[in-house]
Amino acid sequence: MTAQRPRQSEPRGKGRPRAFDRAQALNKALEIFWRQGYAPASVAELCKAMEINPPSLYATFGNKANLFLEALRHYEHTYWDAPARRFLAEPDVYSAVEQFFQEAAEILLSPETPCGCMVVLAAVNISEDEKEIIATVRDLRLATKTMFADRFRRAIQEGQIPADTDVPALAGALNTLLEGLSLQARDGLFQSELKAIAAHAVRMLPPRSPNS
Amino acid sequence: MTAQRPRQSEPRGKGRPRAFDRAQALNKALEIFWRQGYAPASVAELCKAMEINPPSLYATFGNKANLFLEALRHYEHTYWDAPARRFLAEPDVYSAVEQFFQEAAEILLSPETPCGCMVVLAAVNISEDEKEIIATVRDLRLATKTMFADRFRRAIQEGQIPADTDVPALAGALNTLLEGLSLQARDGLFQSELKAIAAHAVRMLPPRSPNS
DNA sequence: TGATTTATGTATCGTTTGCTATAAAATATT
DNA sequence: AATATTTTATAGCAAACGATACATAAATCA
């Protein structure tokens, strides 16, 4: 019936053209999953938000789990790629940590979706047989810890922090605080409170090396 | 059929005596909720673990939500009352924080149920209309932050930390790290790693006051 | 134009969910 | 022994879940 022109020009295949914009629908799904998490977001509700019917969802994204995984990847790139790049680019490790945690506090309580990090919160209470989702969010969380660790090893080489710094533990502690921030965001803290907490991240670093 | 004697002598009412031990069944339910969270724990699975049938569950505990709330209270008292008491009893605030976070790391990865804190993790992805559960876990998490804050105000009065310490932010930061530890526990960290992270909590405290 | 291909809306599928109606069993009371 | 009260096990409820069968609509290709 209402067969609108596709809003986005694509390679154009043979059969009947898609009546909705794929990227736009994915963004709507992302928002639902972000706010509610994987399990409570029903396919019916997703379809309503995406303004499509179940057959379109399944033809385009495979199934609910695949839709979630694609939304998750899109979320990660959209919101966290740039802060991560800036974290690695900042020469001073103390400034890098301070900056990153302030940016994180802003993302976690961004006005549109003030509900913490999707990677941290969306798949906590999930059926044990959703193995791919569990592994994916776990790996993404691990990647952040690795990013911290790599940065601290560089800081040691550059003499910014002591050589005997327990890098895995420090990276783990920062990652723990970062993930905890998502729970605070979900619990309704104001952004000012979240930022005041985030400012404590840099305190866990060892004192600046004397020769730097 | 298998009508065993109740394992626990109670006031003994009029009708047919209960064939199972209420506290024992509650503990089994607690374990299921702890491992899986509220939503993924189906009534069928709960019944199987509790070794009772649905009518017994509903007659004894009301419904799934009430069973969860009772299990949650039982969990809180069983595992966290004593550490909280010791935290408040320890005279030195630095030692108090160190001790508490080491104990927390032990509880979160206790051999029987190595799955983080039930208050933090069991009701993250939950339907929005489970208002009582959401409010209860939120209040319990808030209570821990308040415990931290009260302790730090006392530490200021006793001259252990500077008077200009931002108590709400510091208490919030410790609470954030503590809640983050549950996510780490769920992600499969070893207890040694968790304890190394927990040891970083005390670093967020301001340096010891000179006159103390 | 006719054949082919893909997307769409409707209307449902089988399963699982939390929960309960019912009748029999087991106790106390009279 | 008869009655009242409570718990038990079986069996199944209505609703929601993720996912699809089907016929129709809209495009390309021959």
Image (cartoon, coloured by chain):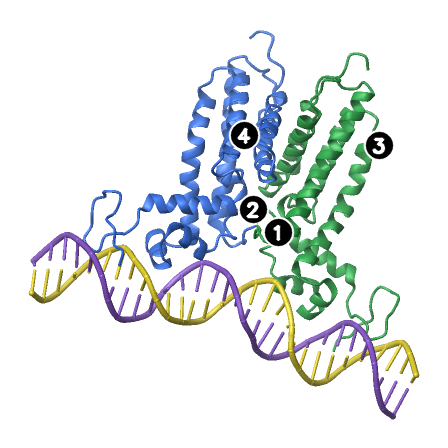
Chain colours: A blue, B green, C yellow, D purple
From this view, report whether residue B82 is shown above or below residue B48: above
Dot 2: chain letter: A
Residue B88 placement, left or right of A45: right
Task: Give the residue pinned by disc 1.
Answer: B37
Q: Of label 3 and label 1, which has the lower sequence position?
A: 1
| Disc 1 residue type (three-letter) | Gly
From this view, report whether residue A64 is shown above or below residue B168: below
The answer to whether marks 3 and 2 sit on the same chain is: no
Residue A128 placement, left or right of B5: left
Task: Give the residue pinned by disc 2.
Answer: A124
The answer to whether marks 2 and 1 sit on the same chain is: no
Label 1 packing within 10 angstroms: few (<14), some (14-19), many (20+) = many
Q: Which mark is residue A105?
A: 4
Residue at mark 4 to residue at mark 2: CA–CA distance: 20 Å
| Disc 2 residue type (three-letter) | Val
Q: Which mark is residue B107?
A: none
Q: Position of residue B115 (x, y in %)?
A: 64, 46
Residue toward you, B109 or A85: A85
Contact check, label 2 and label 1, Cβ < 8 Å: yes
User: For numbered disc 2, what is the local secondary structure?
Assistant: loop
Task: Give the residue pinned by disc 3.
Answer: B89
**Which tag is nearer the camera, tag 3 or tag 4?**
4
Residue toward you, B38 or A206: B38
From this view, report whether residue B81 is shown above or below residue B21: above
Residue at mark 3 to residue at mark 1: CA–CA distance: 32 Å
The answer to whether marks 1 and 4 sit on the same chain is: no
Q: Position of residue B150 (x, y in %)?
A: 77, 30
**Which tag is nearer the camera, tag 1 or tag 4?**
4
Q: Residue A159 is drawn in which quadrant?
A: top right
